[in-house]
Image (spheres, rainbow, N blue to C red):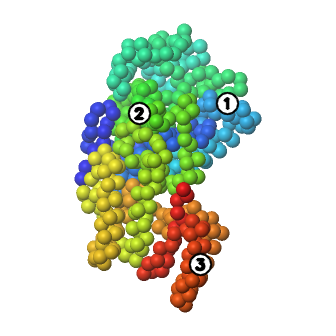
Amino acid sequence: MTLNLYDTMARKKRPFAPADPRRVTMYVCGPTVYNYSHIGNFRPVVVFDLLFRVLRRLYGADAVAYAANVTDVDDKINAKAAAEGVPIATVTDRYLAAYNADAAALGALPPSFQPRVTETMDAIVAMIGRLVENGGAYAAEGHVLFDTQAWPDYGKLSGRSLDDMIAGARVEVAPYKRHAADFVLWKPSKADEPSWDSPWGAGRPGWHIECSAMIEQVLGLPIDIHGGGIDLVFPHHENEMAQGLCADHAEEYARFWLHNGFLNMGDEKMSKSLGNVALAHDLLQQYPGEAIRWALLSAHYRQPLAWTEEVIVQSKNSLDHMYGVLQRAAAVDAGGSASLAEDQIAPLMDDLNSPAAMTALKALANDLDKAVREGAGRAGALKQDLMALAGVMGFLQSDPDAWFQGGADAGLKDRIDALIVARDAARIAKDWPQADRIRAELTALNVDVMDGPNGATWRLREQA
């Protein structure tokens, strides 16, 4: 079965084929590490983690090279460090660690590479040098700018003409620019800002050149897939492609361009500048990471997603049902190969249609539940299929009992387990009043007890 992906450049879905199946390359723009990231920033993390998982299944885990960069040179980082009176590295290391922890909690596999701008400076300066030498860039008043008129295909990715870009621009045009659309590759640093040596004077890079240099250094050009949010198509990805191609007169930068839609808070794009953000770090204190992951994949990745508490609650309810099925199927052996039938994996092969794949996942869970109740021999195969599809999607990765008991600390768990042992002893002794008293105590602790053929299990009830 062929993986079909919507290519922003082609404006249509195309069958995906890597340049080399032995090394499939993907790059996704990562965080600027100056604060905790909001949940909208994590939509591409989860979306492209899903694609990473699908590619690993198709080509092998060792055959997929996935790079997600870290921007650790930025005005906001400088301002944060100055406000706290700490070195810049203190800020970037702190928030990169938080970002990676939040991504892991959302079920995202670590990327193969996580290059940082500060670790790529030599490659950035070298690429700018080649652009100047090739006539694609020019130095002016301590700056180096990309010459958009030197690249005839500028605007091809976003579908904008150069005149339209200028007409829609609301930026002050610096007097040293040859053309209003020209953008900065290198700029002088202020006295209190980080600075690196270059042939054009001490300074630091512009935003767009950073990604081009990191891709070239870590993955090599061209790459198979370049991903990111829809807001990056212009100017970031447009500029990135133009300078990347001009630096070496190359013909291709990325074989496929994939972009996820906005995550909206109500009718507005979620944005720190608008003040309407929900931090993933905070949400993870309230909800399991898998529930947030389910919510982020509940709409097709190219469509906008309205973020509401109801979406998360519904997501957790869906996972509660499936984990409940797995609890009831605990004794079912799901050994054997983790192959998936074409109809089960088909939604993901059709441009990562996660809502349809979730429907298939729910159907497998319901069929497994029915097979367990009926004692059907096909329960093992159904459980195997359920766990295989869930594994590709990053779901059902917890122990079912732990899923339902996740809100209890160690002390509460010990107390509940002791009460259940005492209740079992009372039931064996047919001391029904004592068993009822213990059950009432468990209820007061917000605990539901489920008696089954393999003994009692318990879960914490949702707080009202």
Q: Residues within 10 Å of mark 1 (few under 14, many from 20)?
A: some
Whole-number angstrom distance, CA of label 3 to CA of label 2 = 58 Å
Question: Mark on residue 455?
Answer: none
| Residue farthest toward the top in the current orientation of the protein | 175
| Residue farthest toward the front in the current orientation of the protein | 433
Badge 3 element: helix
The amino acid marked with disc number 2 is Ile
Reading the image, the residue beneath label 2 is 230
The amino acid marked with disc number 1 is Ala
The amino acid marked with disc number 3 is Arg
Whole-number angstrom distance, CA of label 1 to CA of label 3 = 60 Å
Q: On screen, 63 above or below 260? A: below
Residue 275 makes an appearance in the image: yes
Q: Nearer the viewer, residue 150 or 256?
A: 256
Badge 1 element: helix
Badge 2 element: helix
Going 31% across and 51% down the picture, which residue do you hit? 356
Reading the image, the residue beneath label 1 is 79
Residues tagged 3 and 2 counted as in contact (Cβ below 8 A):
no
Q: Position of residue 276 (x, y in %)?
A: 54, 35
Reading the image, the residue beneath label 3 is 437
Going 54% across and 65% down the picture, which residue do you hit? 460
